[in-house]
Image (cartoon, helix red, strand yellow):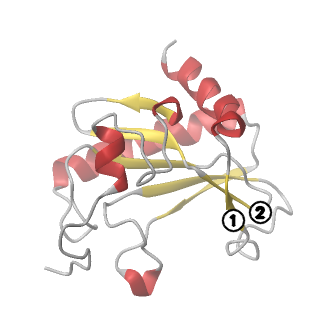
Amino acid sequence: MHNHAPHNYNCPLCLAIQGIESDATMMKQADIFYRDDLVMAAINSKFIGNNPGHIIVFPVTHYENLYDLPEKEGNRIMNIAKEITLALKEIRKCDGTMILQNNEPASGQHAFHYHLHIFPRFEGDELHANMSDSRVATPEERKPFSSAMKEYFNK
């Protein structure tokens, strides 16, 4: 209904779900630390300002945005998001967490597959001021974050 993906959109999250690593997706399979029949979670390939290693949670079925997302997947995403925030508190010793989700280009959605960002927050991290200060982290830079989350979820 409110979709903006161009015709023949090569969805980077769908590629990751299929296990494909290519120039069309920055996500590597090593970034993924959680998967069940409805959702996946991974370390985001982009590091933002003073908040490296934030997480995205997304459905394994392609839905462009929140408007299209079925309740079953939405509920599962929120349940996993809660588990992830508790993991971040334990692993990263963060002072808080923040959830961000964009719908449509006017909100900043750039990957046209629903995904929920989860940021560990630290006193004075200035995340909002640094949102435009992002870079693609190397797989090696992301590995410690995904490894810690894999260990947490495989207990």
Tell me: residue 90, above or below residue 134: above
Task: Specify the quadrant of the image occupied by residue 21.
Answer: top left
Q: Where is residue 122 in the image (x, y as percent from the top left)?
A: 79, 54
Q: Which of 104 and 152 is in front in this view?
A: 104
Q: Where is residue 93 in the image (x, y as percent from the top left)?
A: 76, 37
The amino acid beneath tag 1 is Ser
Residue 133 position, x and y percent, is: 73, 70
Among the 4 quarters of the image, the one containing residue 91: top right
- Residue that mark 1 sits on: 134
Of discs 1 and 2, which sits in the foreground? 1
| Looking at the image, residue 33 lies above or below residue 106 | above
Which badge, 1 or 2, comes first in the chain's sequence?
A: 2
Q: Residues within 10 Å of mark 2 (few under 14, many from 20)?
A: some
Q: Distance between the residues labelled 1 and 2?
A: 6 Å
**In the image, what residue occupies the spot 84% across and 58% down?**
123
Q: Name the residue under label 2.
A: 49
Q: In this orientation, which residue lies closer to the viewer: 97 or 52?
A: 52
Cβ atoms at labels 1 and 2 below 8 Å apart: yes
